[in-house]
């Protein structure tokens, strides 16, 4: 049976209807029958079974179990787990093993979760379809001719296909929420600084956050609460209480941008779903307010100027000397760098390193990088004002249902447009959740996104749970 929440699993274990080893074996057999999805790059089979047996024994002894016992979880291949390989789905990290665990992993393990393996993604988390992995495409379990979204495509596909109960991904501009929308599950990005980035391979450090993929908001909350909070290894983490009390409300004030519903790039069926959402929310007593947003066209350019700038700096460390892949044909140091990087990185990563190097270069720094930082500030102020006045901003998660393989690979700009609604939350550092609320006539999913002010994750979960009951 496919469980939709961890509490169901824990109840079943307590009633001895199942045990942790059976759960693990069941996922392993699902992985085997769904090999074609290419979601897992590596499965930690033997050690997961061993850990399951040890946890079953702990349970049988009547010991106090961790909050996440019974949770079998997979990691996006950019989250470090000590003594296990990690490659960011890149050839350049060939053979590399983590020498320490990320804080998120440490916290999962200390709550008795089991880490089942590492999941395919776009190389260095750059992409929206998982077509940029050095290890092949991940198929969408809902329709295998379509992409699962990206960059955390393996993480999303694995949850949808029940290859494990939940997964972790990373979200720099939508890489959790967009694939969650494409695979019809819940995806969540916390406030910047809520979950430690220690042990997450950096793409764009002022945007990156780790977050969960689950089938229910309840599980998102449980995993988030276990891994969030201050961490001495990441100076950008906040000590603000995770369980901040929000005045419990039954009705909320929800803003939406009319520009989204009028945008040419948004498909008719997504617009229709949004209208339906707003209508139902109103019928349920929520206040809906229209808020004109004149910056929609600037979001993608701001995002790509700033993230590629940070990426060009973060990825400088992969030089063929310190990590992974080293070209065999180099005659001197300069050539070693050039060849190792040319052979080790894929085309999208190279494109972004070059773009980022360009926007940071002496003659163009002010025109691009400084300007984009200024607009980032304006957007932050604007959203802060909006989300002080309203509880949530509502948008679709994506402009369309999942597209077919190859549809957008020839035009990077078209691919970048897939993130138009998700990048805002990262630009301004606020939390956002994608909820699997709608499907088109062909059964293809359309996630709906809610964003709240910083540090209001619990409010997002409260309303998210409500919506999953009342709208789904
Ligand atoms: N798809 C976006 C990009 O290509 C977002 C990636 C991410 O969130 N890691 O950059």
Image (cartoon, helix red, strand yellow):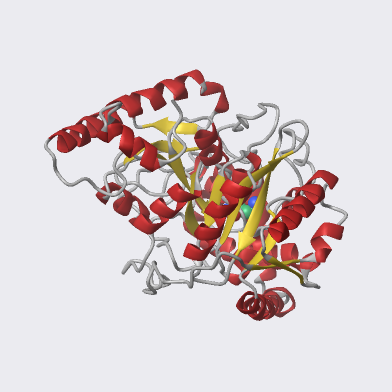
Tell me where residue 38 appears, x and y as whole percent.
Answer: 54, 29
The answer to which image quadrant residue 388 occupies is: bottom right
Q: Quadrant of the N terminus?
A: top left
For this view, does 467 lie left or right of residue 87? Answer: right
Image position of 397 with respect to 410: above or below = below
Image position of 226 with respect to 401: above or below = below
Q: Nearer the viewer, residue 40 or 84?
A: 40
Most distant residue in the left direction: 61
Tell me where residue 118 appears, x and y as whole percent.
Answer: 43, 38
Residue at figure coordinates x 58%, y 40% from the top left: 153
Image position of 178 with respect to 329: above or below = below
Tell me where residue 50 appears, x and y as whole percent.
Answer: 23, 30
For this view, does 315 lie left or right of residue 82? Answer: right
The answer to which image quadrant residue 107 occupies is: bottom left
Residue at figure coordinates x 30%, y 52% from the top left: 106
For this view, does 234 lie left or right of residue 339? Answer: left
Q: Nearer the viewer, residue 207 or 250?
A: 250
Tell me where residue 5 appears, x and y as whole percent.
Answer: 43, 40
């Amino acid at each position: 049976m496919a469980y939709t929440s961890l509490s169901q699993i824990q109840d079943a274990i307590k009633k001895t209807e199942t045990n942790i080893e059976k759960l693990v074996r069941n996922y392993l057999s699902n992985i085997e029958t769904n090999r074609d999805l290419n979601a897992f790059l590596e499965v930690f089979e033997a050690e997961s079974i061993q850990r399951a047996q040890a946890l079953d024994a702990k349970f049988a002894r009547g010991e106090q179990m961790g909050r996440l016992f019974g949770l079998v979880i997979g990691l996006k291949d950019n989250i470090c787990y000590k003594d296990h390989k990690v490659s960011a789905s890149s050839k350049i990290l060939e053979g590399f093993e983590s020498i320490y665990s990320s804080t998120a992993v440490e916290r999962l393990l200390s709550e008795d979760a089991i880490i089942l393996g590492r999941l395919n993604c776009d190389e260095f988390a750059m992409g929206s379809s998982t077509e940029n992995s050095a290890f092949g495409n991940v198929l969408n379990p809902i329709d295998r001719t379509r992409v699962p979204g990206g960059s955390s495509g393996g993480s999303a596909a694995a949850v949808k296909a029940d290859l494990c109960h939940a997964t972790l991904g990373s979200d720099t501009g939508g890489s959790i929420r967009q694939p969650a929308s494409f695979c019809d599950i819940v995806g969540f990005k916390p406030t910047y600084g809520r979950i430690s980035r220690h042990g997450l391979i950096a793409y764009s450090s002022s945007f990156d956050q780790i977050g969960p993929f689950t089938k229910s908001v309840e599980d998102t909350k449980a995993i988030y609460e276990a891994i969030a909070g201050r961490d001495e290894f990441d100076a950008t983490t906040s000590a603000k209480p995770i369980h901040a009390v929000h005045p419990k409300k039954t009705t909320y004030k929800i803003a939406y941008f009319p520009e989204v519903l009028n945008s040419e790039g948004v498909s008719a069926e997504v617009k229709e779903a949004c209208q339906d959402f707003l209508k139902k929310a109103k019928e349920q007593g929520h206040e809906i307010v229209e808020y004109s947003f004149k910056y929609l066209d600037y979001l993608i350019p701001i995002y790509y100027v700033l993230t590629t700038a940070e990426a060009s700096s973060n990825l400088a460390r992969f030089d063929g000397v310190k990590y992974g892949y080293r070209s065999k044909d180099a005659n001197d140091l300069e050539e070693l760098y050039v060849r190792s990087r040319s052979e080790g990185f894929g085309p999208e990563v190279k494109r972004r390193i070059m773009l980022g190097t360009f926007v940071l270069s002496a003659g163009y720094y002010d025109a691009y990088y400084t300007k984009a930082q200024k607009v980032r500030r304006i957007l932050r102020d604007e959203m802060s004002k909006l989300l002080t006045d309203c509880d949530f901003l509502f948008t679709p998660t994506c402009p369309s249902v999942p597209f077919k393989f190859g549809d957008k690979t020839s035009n990077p700009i078209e691919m970048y447009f897939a993130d138009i609604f998700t990048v805002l939350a990262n630009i301004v550092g606020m939390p956002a959740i994608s909820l699997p609320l709608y499907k088109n006539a062909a059964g293809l999913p359309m996630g709906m996104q809610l964003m709240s002010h910083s540090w209001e994750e619990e409010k997002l979960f409260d309303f998210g749970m409500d919506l999953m009951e009342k709208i789904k």
